[in-house]
Every structure is written in structure tokens, then in C-alpha cells.
Amino acid sequence: MARIQILELPMVHRGDDTETPFALIIDQAGPSLVDETGMLRQGLQQNLCEQLGARAVLVFEETVDIPANELTLTHVQEAADGNIVRLRVEPDLDGFTDKVMTEVAKAQADARAAFK
């Protein structure tokens, strides 16, 4: 089943408005998204960009991991006694996969409906 990832692009400042553009990354794409040449089905990219507001849609048949989507925070501080204290904070993503898969299924249904 295809995975959807979002890659945030650099912020755009226009006067008082600030926008965070993004690219939609779809990997593990199968025949429902790519044609026999491995290219995104005709019209799908423009449709996804218009409906979702993405700047670009990149589709891969293989798995692509985006390091920017990994979040690990490390804080180093020297304690009063001179010892170094390191704290590492990792996100708790319990249930996140289920939520994302629900949204993916909804997006796939919307995409199929758009091409009927």
C-alpha cells in the first residue's frame, strides 16, 4: 500500500503573510498511481496539487524515507557540578500510524472519485 509523506519546504514571506509550502511524497506506489512506465498517472499530479495545495507531488515505486520527517531532540547542558547532562527526547507516535492510514485511505478514495 502506498505511503504518503509531507516534506516541508522553506517558508515564504509575502508582506504580513507567511506560507509554509510543501511537497507530497508518495512511495511504495502501485499500479493505481503509476503507469507501466513508472510515471505518475496522467492528470493525477495536477489534481493532487490543486486539491491539497502541494507545490509538487513526487511518486516512487520503492520506499523513500525522508530524514526531515524524523524528530529527535538532543539537549546538552553542563550541570553546576561540572558534569555534562544530555537529554534526548523522542516523539511518542502510538496510534499515529492508524491515523495516517485512515487519512491515506480517505485520500485514495477521493483520488479515485476524482477520476471517475
Image (cartoon, grey):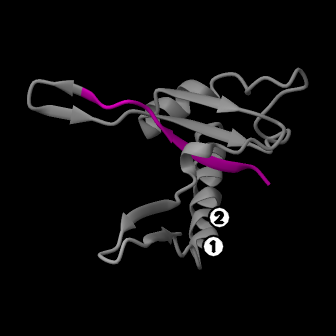
Kind of residue sitting beneath label 1? Asp
In the picture, measured across the screen, residue 34 lies left or right of residue 50, that is: right
Q: Nearer the viewer, residue 108 or 93?
A: 93
Percent position (x, y) of residue 30? Answer: 84, 42
In the picture, measured across the screen, residue 113 lies left or right of residue 65, that is: left
What residue is shown with label 2?
101
Percent position (x, y) of residue 116? Answer: 66, 39
Percent position (x, y) of residue 97? Answer: 64, 69
Q: Is residue 10 magenta?
A: yes
- Residue 73 vertical position relative to residue 4 in the rendered view, above or below: below
What residue is shown with label 1?
98
Residue that extends furthest to the front in the rendered view of this protein: 81
Percent position (x, y) of residue 38? Answer: 85, 25
- Residue 115 found in image quarter: top right
The answer to whether marks 1 and 2 mark residues whose Cβ atoms lie closer than 8 Å is yes
Packing grade of label 2 (10 A; few <14, some 14-19, many >=20) is some
